[in-house]
Image (cartoon, helix red, strand yellow):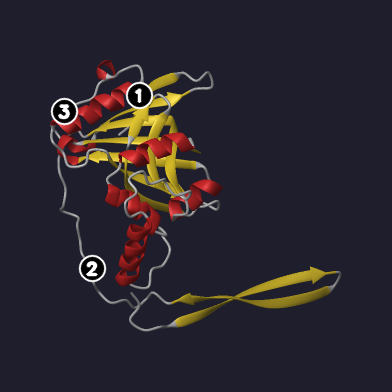
Amino acid sequence: MIRKKQIRMCSAVTKYTMAETSIVAVVETEEVPDFTERIDHHLSLAELRENYSRARLDESDCETNPIVMFQRWLKDAQVAALKEPNAMTLATATADGKPSGRIVLLKEVSDLGFVFFTNYESRKGQEVKTNPFASLTFYWAELERQVRVEGSVQVVPRAESQAYFDRRPRGSRLGAWVSSQSATAETRHVVEEKLKQIEERFKGIEQIPAPDHWGGYRIIPDSVEFWQGRPNRLHDRIRYRRDSQDKWILERLWP
């Protein structure tokens, strides 16, 4: 945060020489904020750390298929009664590489990939439309584990999206019709009024269709990394990488 709105003008001086004639051009560029003075709201977290020692990950412990390995680790998280073990950070980017991330829920995993559902008109939906690649990160702190997935994105067939939509609680189905996800809402009251309108629209109707702007995406993995915390930050990292023959290569990464 800047205490005083101090602005400095940047000028670029360029000298052009053309056949005994010198031309000096002064080009004014954008205004650049002066960050030399800031309000001091500094918080040091340098001493906040954990030393991981719960388990280890050896190549001999790994499955030949990363999906099977992932299902095994996800089961461990479920058995440990972790809250929302299917929560994952979904990272996407614009066509020019500006990233964004958010937590979403994994709803299906198979050899075809990792599936989640959302509003196609949301920020993430717009980003994967122009840049159809994404990454997922699962973090299970209590198990000192994380999984990283990278791959391409494809839209789930409409029938599959509707089949999942039909299994959602009624309130969630109505919510999908209400929300213009990622758009600006003037007040909470506007949102609640829209819900009342949607409730009235579908009053007495049990079979609610999924809106056209809502459905699933599937991340088709090119790589899946399994990370197990170890002492002294020398963590175990095992990556499955898909080769040109569509085979999975198992390799250890440096911590």
Badge 2 is on which residue? 42
Mark 1 or 2: in front is 1
Q: Earlier in the sequence, mark 3 or mark 1?
A: 3
Locate residue 132, reporting x and y percent.
52, 42
| 249 in relation to 230, above or below | above
Disc 3 marks which amino acid?
Ala
Q: Secondary structure at mark 2?
A: loop
Disc on res. 55: 3
Viewer can see residue 136? no
Of 87 and 231, which appears nearest the observer? Answer: 87
The reply to whether dot 3 and dot 1 touch (C-beta < 8 Å) is no
Label 3 sits on a secondary structure element that is: loop
Q: Estimate the spatial distance between the alpha carbons at disc 3 and disc 1, rounded to whole Å.
A: 19 Å
For the residues labelled 1 and 2, say whether their Cβ atoms are less than 8 Å apart.
no
The tag earlier along the polypeptide, 1 or 2, is 2
- Residue that badge 1 annotates: 66
How far across and how far down the image is residue 74, in percent?
A: 24, 30
